[in-house]
Image: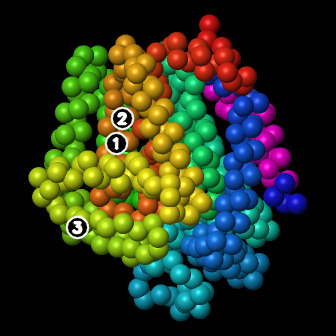
Amino acid sequence: MIFIIFTLFFSWIVYKFSFFQIGNLSKPFLIGVWLLKSVAAWFYCEYHIIHANGADTLGYFRDAAMISRLLFEQPMIFLELVFAPSAHYPVPEHIEPYVDKMGWWHTPQTYFIIRFHAVISLFTFQSFHTNALFFSFMAFAGIVAFARAIVQLLPEFSKFALFPLFLLPSLIFWTSGGHKESFLIFCFGFSLYFQICWFREKRFYYLLLMVLFFLGIFFSRKYIAFFVCPFLVANFLVYYTKRYQYSIVAMFWVFWLVVFAFIEFPNIQMNYLEAIQDKYLQFQTLATGNTHFELAYFETGLLHILSRFPESFFNSFLRPSGLIGFGLWQTITALENIGIVLIILICIFYFDRSKLHPYLINLLIYSALVLILLGFIVPNAGAIVRYRIIIFPLFVLFFSLTAKDKLYKYIYGLIPFIRPLK
């Protein structure tokens, strides 16, 4: 019952607030997408309970439920576990009994999500499915924020369909539960949205909000934040320069990758490439199950990295690639991959060079680099499908936004929720 109540409440928010009005996408369409994500949130939980023994997402919830119960029993301990720094040694004696029962207190980037679960559980009466619904709505709001940013940043493209942001099956499913992906999409969407708000209105608090949401990405996945930062900075460069914008974007990315990749970070005593190598070794624990594949050792040499670009892009973009000999979800994902490849090929066939814009080139570079990064370090197709969803739609979006108008005239004629091109 509480799940249905919050589903209707969030539907009312989508219907009532003008924030959820994007270009040529009608409110019925967006409400329909949200209801689809609410259903996906329920099945997301059922899938993890029945087929994955709860996996880590149920572990997050159980740790958070224990914390939320402390609000009425030990309120000061509740506040400390939710808001105070974690992973410090020695563990304070007064919280040690609770830390011993949790699995991620010593991992700040993961414990960050448990903090959110603990707060949400106060409103959901510790309902696992309803907690997932909250995360699903966060991801939905982040997608809407990103779509609004694109429409404001590139008003000449506002009439184009933004379907890659809303209707990719893997996007709907994997951002509908209590994992980092939902939170990352929420933070990324709003960081870009508030950056564009700054471009339009020059109010300082927009910059503060942009930085705040960027920090949310940083505290969740630092190796993703390493690419989000230059993406946002490059947007500033495009906005404040009037000439040679394409060259400026390209040269800035080269500068960032060449210079900052080799700077040693004092807090971890390694540079970014060495940190990626360390992350690769951590991901070797995923080398189990029927979606594991052999992944070459990540070396920090420039020639080695460049030589493995095609393989890495294949790993993150097309795996799982087989239709036979896999489970149901792998087959569905493989079919989705085939469909996306066809969509991209169609968009390339209808490619309109006049639609290119430095902001879109920046988006393409950012999304391609993150996809390649995932292909370098993650040796499990199942994990890649979930991790890449924070970036996959953006890569597809580049091609959908650079297709000729006549392709969309045909699409708009087939889909009743889309207003036709004028």
Quarter placement of the N terminus: bottom right
Q: Residues within 10 Å of mark 2 (few under 14, many from 20)?
A: some
14 is within the stretch colored magenta: yes
Colour basis: rainbow
C-alpha gap between disc 3 and disc 1: 21 Å
205 is within the stretch colored magenta: no
Near-viewer residue (331 or 296): 331
x, y percentage for residue 195? 46, 34
**Magenta span: helix, strand or loop, mainly?**
helix
Label placed on residue 368: 1
* Tags 2 and 3 touching, CB below 8 Å: no
Q: Say what secondary structure mark 3 lies in.
A: loop
Q: Give the vertical position of 415 relative to 405 (above or below).
A: below
Q: Give the vertical position of 405 relative to 114 (above or below).
A: above
x, y percentage for residue 395? 42, 38
Q: Give the vertical position of 187 relative to 345 (above or below).
A: below
Residue labelled with disc 2: 364
Lateral position of residue 260 relative to residue 43, left or right: left
Near-viewer residue (246 or 369): 369
Type of amino acid at the residue the image marks with label 1: Ala
Task: Residue at 74% x, 52% y: name it.
Answer: 39
Residue labelled with disc 3: 297
* Tags 3 and 1 touching, CB below 8 Å: no
Name the residue at the front extreme.
324
Q: What stretch is highlighted in magenta?
A: 5-22
Type of amino acid at the residue the image marks with label 3: Tyr
Q: Say what secondary structure mark 2 lies in.
A: helix
